[in-house]
């Protein structure tokens, strides 16, 4: 298995190859939140990149989660906190979802052979799925406004470590090696490592410290969300 990392959506075209399994990662917080809402019983997620499209779905009666610049949009039912999506609110429902970075990254990777959603919360289930199904993986980091961030990058290193423990892995580029080295430095205390990071500061400024703690907790859900190119929805792998 080959493992590579695209450090931001803007760089993804330089890492993309045919037949990739792409894993979209937005640790703080979209990919973690998507895993949580599916774990709590949402039947599907409809990711949209633009606010106006989300508003149209809202007017048609859909539940909508929408966030820009760390804050819940006024028209939406939910923001981008994993704690918004309780079983009581989402079980048995489809949820339209748009965020500053995560859903933009999904749009960039939507034509991949297979697109998965990754987070620390499902890293174990994701690793097992990839070992069984993938030949070349590209971790597509959502970053922040097309810039690289630390939290998504260290996840790439953590996933590389998990996959390496299960079998032979070939590192695809220097970007993957950078992620591997950063994870070696961060793994003893990921929260401490990220406390000076840009996006952690944004979460704290908006009262979302509890979200950050949850987003760095490993193996809290046992699902692998998969994007369906035909209907453009994300569902749990069966």
Image (spheres, helix red, strand yellow):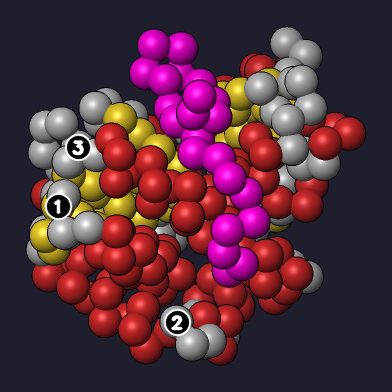
Residue where numbered disc 1 is placed = 2
Q: How much space separates mark 1 and mark 3, taking CA atoms?
A: 10 Å
Residue ID at (52%, 60%): 120
Residue 187, labelled with which disc?
2
Residue at the right extreme of this rendering: 88
In percent of the image, x 66 and y 22: which residue is there? 43
Q: Would residue 62 be found to the left or right of residue 141 on screen? A: right
Query: Residue at image x 58%, y 45%?
Result: 222
Camera-side residue of 51 and 154: 154
**Nearest the eye: 221 or 62:** 221
Would residue 205 appear left or right of 22 to someone viewing this image? right
Q: Quadrant of residue 223?
A: top right
Instruction: Return the mark for residue 116.
Output: none
How far across and down, in percent of the image, does residue 195 sit? 56, 85
**Residue in view at x 44 percent, y 30 percent:** 226
Q: Are marks 2 and 3 in contact (CB under 8 Å)?
A: no
Residue 42 shows in this picture: yes
Marks 1 and 2, how far apart at CA: 22 Å
Q: Secondary structure at mark 3?
A: loop
Q: Secondary structure at mark 1?
A: strand
Dot 3, how many residues are within 10 Å of its Cα: few (below 14), some (14-19), or many (20+)?
many
**Magenta span contains residue 66:** no
Residues 142 and 3: in front is: 3
Q: Quadrant of residue 112?
A: top left
Q: Position of residue 235 (x, y in %)?
A: 54, 26
The picture places residue 60, in percent across and down from the top left corner, at 73, 11
Task: Check disc 2: other Cα within 10 Å, few if <14, some if 14-19, many if 20+.
Answer: some
Q: Position of residue 190 (x, y in %)?
A: 52, 81
Residue ID for mark 3: 20
């Amino acid at each position: 298995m080959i493992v590579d990392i695209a450090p931001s959506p803007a760089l993804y075209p330089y890492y993309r190859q045919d037949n990739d399994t792409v894993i979209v990662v937005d640790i703080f917080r979209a990919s973690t939140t998507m895993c949580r809402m599916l774990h709590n019983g949402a039947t599907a997620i409809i990711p949209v990149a633009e606010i106006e499209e989300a508003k149209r779905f809202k007017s048609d009666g859909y539940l909508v989660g929408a966030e820009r610049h760390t804050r819940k949009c006024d028209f939406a039912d939910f923001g981008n906190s994993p704690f918004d999506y309780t079983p009581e609110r989402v079980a048995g429902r489809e949820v339209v979802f748009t965020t500053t970075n995560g859903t933009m990254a999904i749009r960039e990777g939507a034509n991949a052979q297979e697109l998965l959603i990754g987070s620390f919360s499902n890293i174990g289930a994701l690793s097992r799925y990839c070992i069984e199904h993938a030949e070349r993986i590209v971790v597509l980091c959502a970053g922040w406004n097309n810039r690289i961030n630390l939290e998504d990058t260290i996840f790439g290193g953590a996933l590389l470590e998990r996959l390496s423990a299960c079998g032979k892995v070939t590192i695809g580029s220097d970007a993957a090696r950078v992620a591997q080295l950063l994870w070696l430095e961060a793994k003893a205390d990921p929260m401490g490592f990220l406390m000076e990071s840009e996006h952690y500061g944004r979460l704290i400024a908006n009262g979302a410290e509890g979200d950050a703690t949850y987003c760095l907790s490993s193996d809290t859900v046992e699902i692998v969300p998969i994007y369906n190119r035909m209907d453009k929805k994300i569902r749990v792998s069966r």
